[in-house]
Image (cartoon, grey):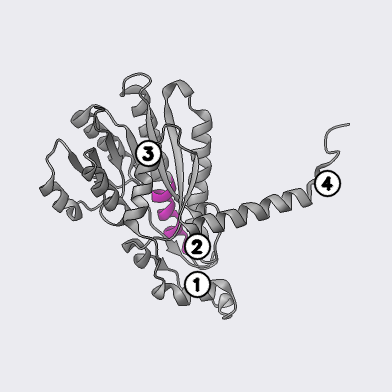
Amino acid sequence: MASPRVWFITGTSTGLGKALVELVLAKGEIVVATARRTAPLDDLKAAYPASRLLVLKLDVSKPAEITAAFAQAKEAFGRLDVVVNNAGWGTFGEVESVVDADARAMFDTNFWGAVDVSRAALAFFREVNAPGVGGRLVQISSCCGVVGLPGQAFYCASKFALEAVSESIAAEIDPSWNIKVTLIELGAFSTEGIQKIAWSTPHPAYSKPELPVHGMRNMWDQFNPQGDVKKAVEVFYTVAGLPEPPLHIAVGKDSIGMSKAKLGKVLAEFEKYEYLSENLNKD
């Protein structure tokens, strides 16, 4: 019988992160659960022994805390099999209205935090795990990493950036390391985080009711995603166990529909204007 895998998951205090921790533990596996606030994990700490669950305080925007968390995971379990970059948050509003400091702070978590966790994971899989054992790096992205949406420009940009760096990681790593990278482009699921998203002060130039961003602002308080968080994390778990996981997987019919429409439009535009690239080589 195979040994239980050891998972390292960020952003586990609520929502998808906590649901994934609960699922992995229920499956008999081991979790290093990290979060900026660890109190919401006290119920799980009481229910599982230290041999199954290690809860660590981690703000992924602080590189020193990432280094310390991976060192503690090594000391506790000696290996990691799956690292899930789940920590993230959103600040919404028109590009002209979002305060730079808010957008940069979000990038520090959604992009740079994920990058630093990814770097630590790659080194751990390669240098701490037994040679060739490798590991799985699962990046919780979004359909917003494929499609730019009104009112969500900087959140989308942070996820677009995560998509790009993850594709590059997958192209850079030595196949002999046996490290698999997967981006999960998630649709809308009912989590506490959606209700906590902060919107910037509206920019007066975008006040026309017919503008999409105006409608987005007005409907947000009533936005009620139908996606079930527990069903979503079941997909995460399945993907992390595939022998040859995909680099990209859209999760949720909304994500699939939006992503297909965007990619189809891009392809059509490329093909329509391909003639403009004829005869561009040096004579």
- CA neighbours of label 4 inside 10 A, class few (<14), some (14 to 19), many (20+): few
For marks 4 and 1, give the CA distance. Answer: 38 Å
Q: CA distance from mark 1 to mark 2?
A: 9 Å
Q: Residue 240 got which mark?
A: 3
Q: Amino acid at mark 3?
A: Ala
> For residue 275, which numbered disc appears in the image?
4
Q: Inspect the image, locate mark 4, and give the three-letter code of the amino acid beneath it.
A: Tyr
Q: Nearer the viewer, mark 2 or mark 4?
A: 4
In the image, residue 272 sits, relative to residue 67, either above or below, namely below
Mark 3 or mark 4, earlier in chain: 3
Disc on the earlier residue, 1 or 2: 2
Q: CA distance from mark 2 to mark 4?
A: 33 Å
Residue at the extreme front of the image, as rendered: 1
Q: Are marks 1 and 2 in contact (CB under 8 Å)?
A: yes
Look at the numbered disc 2 and give the secondary structure of its residue.
loop
Instruction: Of the two numbered discs 4 and 1 on the same chain, state the one appearing first in sequence.
Output: 1
Determine whether the residue tagged by mark 3 lies in a helix, strand or loop. Answer: helix
- Using a 10 Å C-alpha cutoff, classify the residue at mark 3 as few (fewer than 14 neighbours), some (14 to 19) or many (20 or more): many
Is 118 covered by the magenta stretch? no
Res. 216 mark: 1
Q: Is there any visible trace of residue 203 in the rendered image?
A: no
Segment colored magenta = 99-111
Alpha-carbon neighbours of circle 2 within 10 Å: few (<14), some, or many (≥20)? many
In the image, is 175 to the left or to the right of 211?
Answer: left
Q: CA distance from mark 1 to mark 3?
A: 34 Å
Q: Nearer the viewer, residue 255 or 139?
A: 255
**Residue 35, image x and y in percent?**
26, 49
Q: Earlier in the sequence, mark 1 or mark 3?
A: 1
Query: What x and y, as percent, mark residue 206?
Result: 57, 75
